[in-house]
Image (spheres, rainbow, N blue to C red):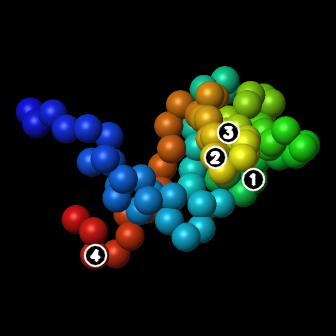
Amino acid sequence: MVVVDGNALAGTLADSLGPEPTVVALRCAGCGSLGVLGQTTVYRTAMGSVARCRGCDTVLVTVVESGARRWVGLPGARTMSASIPDGIE
């Protein structure tokens, strides 16, 4: 086992979200359904955005922008799945 810091995940996470994050699949921790981000129900206010599962209304993703920072949470997403880009092994 090799122990490194979180920087080791930078490329993997960038590849996982890719140029079209709406096709990233999320498994809901509430009901277990699997769906792409683009099919969630999103509520937007001046405070930020909340993406909810269409099946059970669990909060899957939260996005808040504060000054020069963006806070992203995945409180109700048990897993995230994306296709591996060509050329990555």
The C terminus appears in which quarter of the rendering? bottom left
Helix, strand or loop at mark 3: strand
Q: CA distance from mark 4 to mark 3?
A: 29 Å
Nearer to us: label 3 or label 1? 3
- Which residue lies most toward the front here? 67
Mark 4 and mark 3 lie on one chain; the one further toward the N terminus is: 3
Mark 2 and mark 3 lie on one chain; the one further toward the N terminus is: 3
Q: Amino acid at mark 3?
A: Val
Circles 3 and 1: CB atoms closer than 8 Å: no
Q: Position of residue 82 (x, y in %)?
A: 47, 56
* Mark 3 lies on residue: 61
Q: Amino acid at mark 2?
A: Arg
Mark 3 and mark 1 lie on one chain; the one further toward the N terminus is: 1
Nearer to us: label 2 or label 3? 2
Residue at x 73%, y 42% (from the top left corner): 66
* Mark 2 lies on residue: 69
Q: CA distance from mark 1 to mark 4?
A: 28 Å
Residue at x 51%, y 58% (from the top left corner): 17
In this rendering, the answer to whether 31 lies above or below 70 is above
* Mark 1 lies on residue: 39
Q: Amino acid at mark 1?
A: Gln
Mark 2 and mark 1 lie on one chain; the one further toward the N terminus is: 1
Mark 2 and mark 4 lie on one chain; the one further toward the N terminus is: 2
In this rendering, the answer to whether 83 lies above or below 54 is below
Q: CA distance from mark 3 to mark 1?
A: 12 Å
Nearer to us: label 4 or label 3? 3
Residue at x 62%, y 35% (from the top left corner): 73
Q: Indicate left or right for 84 with 77 as reference.
A: left
* Mark 4 lies on residue: 87
Q: Where is residue 6, by image quadrant?
A: top left
Helix, strand or loop at mark 4: loop
